Amino acid sequence: MGGGSWATALARLLMNNCETITWYMRRRDRIDDFIALRHNPVYLTGIPFDVERIFFTDDINQAVAESSTLLLAMPSPYFKSHIDKITLPLNDKNIITAIKGIVPDENRLVTDYMIERFGVKRENLLVVSGPCHAEEVALNHPSFLTIGCNDIAKGKNFGKMIESGNSRVILSDDVDGIEYAGVLKNVYAIGAGIIHGLKLGDNLLAMFVSNAAKEMARFLNTVDPRHRDITDSVYLGDLLVTAYSRFSRNHNFGSMIGRGYSVKSARMEMEQTAEGYYGTKCMHEINANYGVEMPILDAVYDILYRHSSPNYAITRLNSFFN
């Protein structure tokens, strides 16, 4: 479910192991162009698909009726507008979320929303995360995907559906931690991009990212205390690739702000959604209930939503770094 670059990359993996897939996209014109061109007309356009093995539909309930497993890969800001159109029961479906964001206006994880809104069983919920950029996954570059699940057997089964070639799968039972980390790394990537745009140097950027990892750990250990190693790939690895890579839309969004763009103009210039923009507000509001020390989150929030000077907000962080 979804028509962006991440959905396209995951569909590419599935096509290696599945005879057919059902693919829901919101826009009929995009589906028609996809079929005619034999590739996504907007995202990852160089990746060909065998469209005869794909059942396309712009009817989300038809997609649900046809499928026992739903893979959610739409941008988080548009998640509710899509998913709330579902009128069929989901309690017997396996739901896999590849959404790296909080449900808008709800400040809830996608898995929690699916449980509360649709009665999905927790053991039927899985999450898939990085570190993996859609562009590199689609090009069959070495990629490592982490599947978070309470039912490890289901995690293994889904892993077999997406593991092929250079794509490897790691299993974890830290579902909430993986979801929150997927949101926070986008926030921190915006901050890293701002430092890049301000030309403040690699030394500061390294301090920023290392302290972002510590901040992430503080938050995760507060909201869901358990044994986890923040240096695992799904936490630190995903943070690093999102903070540094030229493929990172959140880094690029932040870099534009650092170079002098207003937040509004940077959002207008972006061809794809920088989910960290929305995630920053959600995480700031969520943390108001927990009171975790999160100066980096607060600084990015001040820049994006309180019109603080990027240079001032980033420089002020120096007193918190260690």
Image (cartoon, helix red, strand yellow):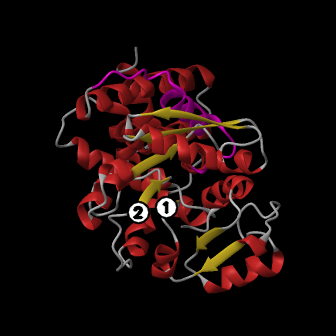
Q: Residue 249 at x, y = what percent?
A: 60, 51
Under circle 2, the secondary element is: loop
Which residue is more in the foreground, 306 or 214? 214
Residue at horizontal 41 percent and vertical 22 percent from the top: 318
| Residue at 30% from the left image edge and 31% from the top image edge | 219
Q: Which residues are magenta?
A: 226-249
Local packing at callout 2 (Cα closer than 10 Å; few below 14, some 14-19, many 20+) is: some
Q: Earlier in the sequence, mark 2 or mark 1?
A: 1
Task: Where is residue 286? Give x, y as percent.
Answer: 24, 46
Query: From where the camera sits, is residue 191 visible?
Result: yes
User: Residue lying farthest top?
Assistant: 322
Decide if residue 7 is on the left or right side of residue 229.
right
Q: Is residue 112 left or right of residue 187?
A: left
Residue hosting label 2? 93
Q: Amino acid at mark 1?
A: Thr
Mark count: 2
Nearer to me, 209 or 19: 19
Residue ID at (32%, 64%): 91
- Residue 152, compared with residue 77, is above or below; it is above
Residue 245 falls within the magenta-colored stretch: yes
Query: Crowding near pointer 1: few (<14 within 10 Å), some, many (20+)?
Result: some
Report, in whole angstroms, how far the alpha carbon at label 2 lies from the one at label 1.
Answer: 6 Å
Q: Quadrant of the N terminus?
A: bottom right
Residue 3 lies, in percent from the top left, at 61, 68
Q: Quadrant of residue 12?
A: bottom right
Residue 306 visible to the viewer: no
Please check the rendered image and state whether residue 182 is part of the magenta-colored stretch, yes or no. Answer: no
Residue 69 - label? 1
Q: Which mark is residue 298?
A: none
Q: Nearer the viewer, residue 139 or 303?
A: 139
Give the image quarter of residue 33. bottom right
